[in-house]
DNA sequence: CTGAAAGCGCTAACAA
DNA sequence: TTGTTAGCGCTTTCAG
């Protein structure tokens, strides 16, 4: 019998197995946008360790849209995914947030495991990096280069990640006897285009920062482009520091100085936590992965600017 | 009863439904690397229309590795995915290719649907763009700018996509009374770094092309960087044309002149074909989506070069 | 038109 | 050890 099975190259039906075992070996991965390189890196890290452990990942993009986000949890519930790992913060507010929390609770009540790689409503991440440390690295680099007026280019206002970032930046600046004036917090929609637009706006400003740290490398690349188009030389007139160190960061011009986040490892970590929890393990405290400054070309010494 | 269900926000068990319906509503998506922006765009296109039709996509990256590729088909068979759409050509050769074909046949024998968005062993794609037309657009642009020695930067040798590309280029050049000399076919591993490396090599060459068309935008961005580092100005000393028009193409410097492929639409198309086939529809001929040249900054007029 | 029963492919518990 | 059976949550069929 077994020989026959082998000969036919029999592949056991995971669906049926899942039905009886009450385990589908499916784990959902939710990101804002799979097209963003850092999200894809994270997804790959998740996929790799999932695969090594017999799990299959199913990725969903929310597009930072609350409705989509809600739909996704429903689908995950329908699929009876064993776990879901959130690689992005939520876009839900008010009623939608309540709804999301309710759905998530139902998911957990049904035995589902949730792990967070980003801040989520009233819950910190299970694994992440210290935003404070990362921002500290960026600011120290800039300050070391003589910058005193340093700004922060953020993603969408209202997102938890943005709030955490702004807060960390404020703290870090304060610790260095610098202040993050309100006009130094530059909000964007979190896209490359948003970065480009903010750089254009910056170029027209009289008292602009001499250096900025960006919420992520994509936005930073947009800033690079916008600055160039507006005749603002990087790093001579504006220093920019990115976040994540995506594969392309070393290839743009000027090459991006950025704070490296070990995205693959973070994904791997997240999946390990999910598997551990699925195996009945207790939730441990937050795991922090190390960050590291990667010095390239986009940040340089501050130059005295004369009044126009 | 229904009221109670609604109140409990009941989510039907897709797994169980799949068991009886012999439909899992799962469709596999296989790409070389989800981190590559064009692959992610394609995946998003697939995901979107899948979702609209009640299907869920499960993405897998092969890393252009034959073993992984084989594993993926097995998993897909185990999962009883309704369909699989190949967004990349195969990395299998010889025995592995035979094995792959056998696995694929078993998948189909079990009622699975396969759709191809890239050339596959002895089978053309179900939906794609005309490589010839795309290459023609690129070459015509370069020729129109006065280039006569134009090279081709390819992905890995041996891949079907590479073969198709080289063949198309040869045809196109011939039709313009130009020849694609062997030394004008520059093979890379298909990564950004590969592009950078080839540009470095090019810079050291005496009789190098004045313009190159690249297998994809990522490689092209690598070329941009490598050329710059080697003191080769783009487009003054070297014109480069990319392929796909990924979101970042407009933001690198110089902004990439490229042949736009409607990746989202292609993904949507692919999923529609899969759904059509799943519904018992007959396989139609190959669907071709339009390509379009996007002129930006990386290709410029050819300049007479004096012998060194 | 509503309600009971059979069965999808597997696993786990039990019987031989 | 090996073989049999019940049942996972649904859908579909058939009887009421």
Image: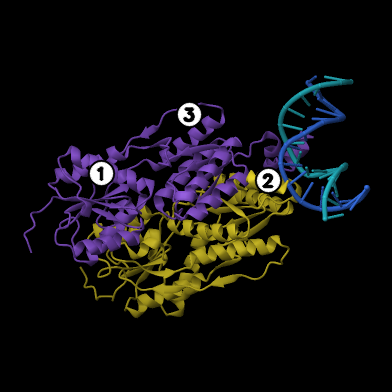
Chain colours: A yellow, B purple, C blue, D cyan
In depth, the one of B301 and B103 nearer the eye is B103
Gap between marks 2 and 3, in whole Å?
Answer: 31 Å
- Which quarter of the figure has residue B253? bottom left
> Quick check: B251 left or right of B49?
left
> Quick check: B134 left or right of A135?
left
Mark 1 or 3, nearer chain start = 1
Numbered disc 2: secondary structure? helix
Residue B74 in the image: x percent, y percent? Answer: 58, 48
Q: Are marks 2 and 3 on the same chain?
A: no
Task: Name which residue lies at 59% across and 38% down.
Answer: B82
Residue B98 in the image: x percent, y percent? Answer: 49, 46
Gap between marks 1 and 3, in whole Å?
Answer: 29 Å
Gap between marks 2 and 1, in whole Å?
Answer: 47 Å
Parent chain of label 1: B
Camera sees residue B68: yes
Residue B133 to residue C15: above or below? above
In depth, the one of A98 and B235 nearer the eye is B235
Q: Which residue is mark 1?
A: B169
Q: Which residue is mark 2?
A: A5
Residue B115 to residue B200: above or below? above
Task: Name which residue lies at 43% across and 35% down.
Answer: B126
Q: Quadrant of the C terminus of chain B?
A: bottom left
Camera-near label (2 vs 1) is 2
> Quick check: B105 left or right of A83?
left
Task: Name which residue lies at 67% across and 57% down.
Answer: A113
Camera-near label (2 vs 3) is 2
Parent chain of label 3: B
Camera sees residue A199: no
Residue A261 in the image: x percent, y percent? Answer: 47, 68
Residue B288 to residue B37: above or below? above
Q: Which residue is mark 3?
A: B283
Numbered disc 1: secondary structure? helix
């Amino acid at each position: 019998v077994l020989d026959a099975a082998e000969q036919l190259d029999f592949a056991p039906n995971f669906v049926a197995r899942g039905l009886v075992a009450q385990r589908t070996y499916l784990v959902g991965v939710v990101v804002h946008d799979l097209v963003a390189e850092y999200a894809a890196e994270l997804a790959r890290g998740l996929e790799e360790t999932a695969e090594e452990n017999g799990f299959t990942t199913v990725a969903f993009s929310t597009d930072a849209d609350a409705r989509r986000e809600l739909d996704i949890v429903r689908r995950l519930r329908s699929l009876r995914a064993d776990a879901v790992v959130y690689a992005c913060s939520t876009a839900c507010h008010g009623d939608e947030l309540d709804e999301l929390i309710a759905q998530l609770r139902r998911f957990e009540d049904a035995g589902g495991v949730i792990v967070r790689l980003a801040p989520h409503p009233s819950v910190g991440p299970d694994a992440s990096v210290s935003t404070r440390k990362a921002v500290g690295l960026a600011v120290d680099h800039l300050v070391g280069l003589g910058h005193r007026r340093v700004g922060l280019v953020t993603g969408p206002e209202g997102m938890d990640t943005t709030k955490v970032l702004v807060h960390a930046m404020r703290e870090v600046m304060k610790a260095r006897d610098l202040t993050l004036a309100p006009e130094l917090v530059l909000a964007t929609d979190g896209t490359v285009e948003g970065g480009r637009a903010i750089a254009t706006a910056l170029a027209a400003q009289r008292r602009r920062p001499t250096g900025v740290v960006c919420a992520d490398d994509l936005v930073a690349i947009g800033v690079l482009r916008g600055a160039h188009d507006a005749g603002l030389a990087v790093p001579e007139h504006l220093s920019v520091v990115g976040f994540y160190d995506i594969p392309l960061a070393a290839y743009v011009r000027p090459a991006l100085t950025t704070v490296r986040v070990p995205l693959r490892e973070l994904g791997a970590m997240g999946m390990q936590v999910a598997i551990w929890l699925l195996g009945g393990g207790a939730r441990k405290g937050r795991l922090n992965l190390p960050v590291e400054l990667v010095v390239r070309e986009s940040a340089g010494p501050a130059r005295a600017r004369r009044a126009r």
